[in-house]
Image (spheres, rainbow, N blue to C red):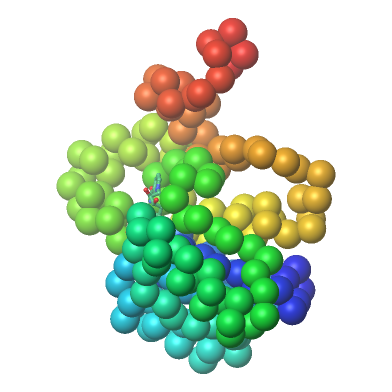
């Protein structure tokens, strides 16, 4: 287990990528504070982690509010005695199109789905677990010599699409 006796916070943990990540951290042994602006849904995710044999607690917080952020860190430390991992599930990794609830709503329009499938070299959308597994790896000792990396997890979106290349922060001579 990668996170035995460790404590993790996952923000935006009530849905999509954050929910999948909360489950993965817990499956790897972490005690997980599932934080979301939608407290009841965060509590629901924590309950389902506990039902699966993990350790978790749901916590309501708006991560744009400094007082809420302090409170969420205090909640993890008070409950489990420390904090080892903070997964700020907002822009820490650079996904392609991932099948989460907001994306699934958008993809109900056939043309939008077709455009998105064509934009990815793998010709499919990503699954939240495929982001969660990278987040877990990055936060673990398995990536112990990796520092400050922005890892692209995009099913070949950037590699083949002009839109993707535009989103590439590297100077054009390095792409
Ligand atoms: N799904 C994709 O294809 C995709 C692509 C690029 C970037 N992202 C980014 O990945 C992150 C997760 O996306 P998702 O698709 O899983 O979305 P989602 O809507 O399924 O989950 C996001 C969660 O964050 C919570 N949240 C929103 N604002 C918050 C706040 N201020 N404080 C606390 N919680 C808050 C929401 O209540 C929700 O439960 C987002 O930052 C999104 O912009 C997603």
Residue 160 visible in the displayed image: no
Q: Quadrant of residue 170?
A: top right
Q: Position of residue 46 (x, y in %)?
A: 47, 82
The answer to which of 44 and 113 lies nearer the viewer is 44
Q: Residue at x 44, y 50 (%)?
A: 90
For the C terminus, the image quarter is top right
Query: Is 57 situated left or right of 12 in this image?
Result: right
In the image, 77 versus 153, the foreground residue is 77
How many circles with numbers are drawn on the protein? 0
In the image: residue 115, left or right of residue 52 = left
Residue 84 visible in rendering: yes
Residue at the image position 37 percent from the left and 34 percent from the top: 118
Tell which residue pokes out farthest to the top in this image.
173
| Residue at 66% over, 39% down | 148
Residue that protrudes farthest toward the front in the picture: 67
Within the image, what quadrant is residue 53 found in?
Answer: bottom right
Question: For the N terminus, which image quadrant?
Answer: bottom right
Q: Residue at x 18, y 47 (%)?
A: 109
Instruction: Locate residue 151, reporting x and y percent.
Output: 60, 40
In the displayed structure, 123 sits above or below 52; it is above
Which picture quadrant has residue 105? bottom left
Dividing the image into four equal quarters, which quarter contains ligand 1? Answer: bottom left
Vertical comparison of 50 with 110: above or below: below
Give percent across and percent down for residue 134: 62, 53
Above or below 137: residue 71:
below
Compared across the picture, whether 57 is left or right of 102 comes to right
- Left or right, residue 75 beside residue 31: left
């Amino acid at each position: 287990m990668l996170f035995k006796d460790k404590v993790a916070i996952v923000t935006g943990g009530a849905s999509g990528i954050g929910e999948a990540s909360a489950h993965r951290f817990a499956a790897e042994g972490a005690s997980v504070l599932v934080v979301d602006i939608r407290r009841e849904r965060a509590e629901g995710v924590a309950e389902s982690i506990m039902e699966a044999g993990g350790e978790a607690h749901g916590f309501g917080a708006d991560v744009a509010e400094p007082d809420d952020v302090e409170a969420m860190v205090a909640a993890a430390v008070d409950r489990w005695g420390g904090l080892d991992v903070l997964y700020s599930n907002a822009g820490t990794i650079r996904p392609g199109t991932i099948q989460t609830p907001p994306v699934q709503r958008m993809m109900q329009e056939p043309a939008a789905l077709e455009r998105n499938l064509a934009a990815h070299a793998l010709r499919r959308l990503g699954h939240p677990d495929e982001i969660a597994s990278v987040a877990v790896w990055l936060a673990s000792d398995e990536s112990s010599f990796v520092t400050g990396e922005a890892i692209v997890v995009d099913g070949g979106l950037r590699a083949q699409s002009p839109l993707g290349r535009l989103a590439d922060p590297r100077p054009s001579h390095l792409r």
